[in-house]
Amino acid sequence: MNKNYLIIEYNPEIIAKLQKNKFNCIYGDAGDVEFVSEINFKKAKLIISTIPDTEINQTLIHTIKKINTNATIILTSHQIDDALELYKNGADYVILPHFLGGEHISTLIENYDNKLSDILVEKINHVHELKTRKEHGFVHP
């Protein structure tokens, strides 16, 4: 997408793979308030947390908003009540993967109108994406 970015990752094995593939990344724990407060968020336009931990995300909101009130903050949650709490505390958008997956498949069905060939193209692309992610050391619970 030709955007500047910084990946913060807690798993040293993933950091090694990201660095090997020339991703801009640093090793750290987003749950560590001291670590997070050392990150320069002043010029950040967009912060995305895929960590579904509400407490960590609350810390991110409060830390970032003190430094940069203009940054857009997108967080992740698995629970509706937690998502609503994050919105209440300043999140600009909260990803709920379960609901997002349902929306994605409904769009897929709507766009492909039961054309098996189009679904197969989507499948091939998805399998390629999954294999690439796996090669980079990403796994999902």
Image (cartoon, grey):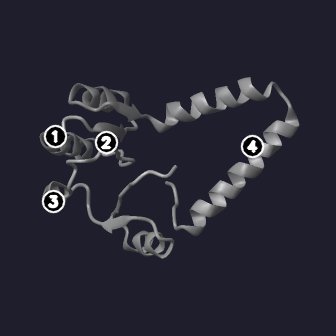
The residue pinned by badge 1 equals 62
Q: Between tags 2 and 4, which lies in front? A: 2
Mark number, residue 49: none
The residue pinned by badge 2 equals 45
The residue pinned by badge 4 equals 122
The residue pinned by badge 3 equals 38
Residue 49 horizontal side relative to residue 123, left or right: left
Mark 2–mark 4 CB contact (< 8 Å): no
Q: CA distance from mark 1 to mark 4?
A: 39 Å
- Residue occupying image coordinates x 37% and y 33%: 94
Element assignment for label 2: loop
Element assignment for label 1: helix
- Residue occupying image coordinates x 27% and y 41%: 54
- Residue occupying image coordinates x 40% and y 37%: 78
Q: Between tags 2 and 1, which lies in front? A: 2
The amino acid pointed to by label 1 is: His
Q: CA distance from mark 1 to mark 3?
A: 14 Å
Give neighbour class at mark 1: few <14, some 14-19, many 20+ (Cα, 10 Å).
Answer: few
Element assignment for label 4: helix
The amino acid pointed to by label 4 is: Glu
